Amino acid sequence: MSSNIVPGNINGTFPIAGQDNSSQGFRDNFTAIKTNFTQAKTEIEYLQDNKANTDANTSFNDYVVSRAVLKDCGQTVYAHGSKSGVVTLNHENGHYQTLVTSGSVSLAFTNFPSTSLGRIILDITYGSTSHTLTVTNPTLAADNVTGFNPSTDTITVSTEGRYLYEFVTPDNGTTILMHQLGKLYTTTP
């Protein structure tokens, strides 16, 4: 953003000492000063409204942040809770989402980015081996997914427990690539 403040509009040599000065010169200088202050106020408010905050949430509105070095970063965990039926994985809820099945689940997806890669990791705990997971998507490509049937886009679990799946799309969800990251995680005390 370039500034529209024009300091050159102010005559710094006016008034001239020792002579009668026109009141128009005073009015011109005051008008230029007022215009510059008004513009400065607008530009400062813009900066305040569009800065990255360290004490509040910041949205970059899908603008690209380049050459950043990130350290000690976390990712939001979105918990769907215990569900059955259609469960929608909303990309805007965060990249890591959890789900516990209380029956068979059919996954749908929404709000993947339109011009960049979208990614969701689903941490799912199957409450029963009779629960299935169906991925409803126009084009699904799955790799290394235990119990996956490509003709029905259904995963049937043979052992209840905790599994991790990754869903990636380069084209706003038209094609979703699915990969199993882990299976049957157990928690030890």
Image: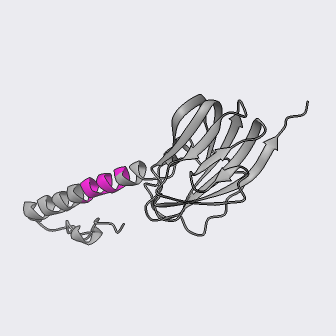
Which residues, given as a range, are shown in magenta? Answer: 36-45
Residue 8: name its quadrant.
bottom left
Measured from the top left, where is residue 131 in percent x and y?
A: 66, 34
For the C terminus, the quadrant is top right
Q: Is residue 109 left or right of residue 14?
A: right
Q: Is residue 60 left or right of residue 161?
A: left
State whether residue 16 appears in this view.
Answer: yes
Measured from the top left, where is residue 155 in percent x and y?
A: 65, 46
Provide the major secondary structure of the magenta segment: helix
Q: Is residue 161 above or below residue 58?
A: above
Depth order, front residue of 160/87: 160
Measured from the top left, where is residue 141 in percent x and y?
A: 59, 62
- In the rendered structure, does residue 151 fall within the stretch colored magenta? no
For the N terminus, the quadrant is bottom left
State whether residue 81 appears in this view.
Answer: no
- In the rendered structure, does residue 40 fall within the stretch colored magenta? yes
Depth order, front residue of 98/8: 98
Report the number of discs.
0
Depth order, front residue of 186/78: 186
Q: Is residue 72 above or below residue 65?
A: above
Measured from the top left, where is residue 34 in percent x and y?
A: 21, 55
Residue beneath the point at 43% across and 61% down? 114
Q: Is residue 102 above or below residue 45?
A: above
Residue 101: name its quadrant.
top right
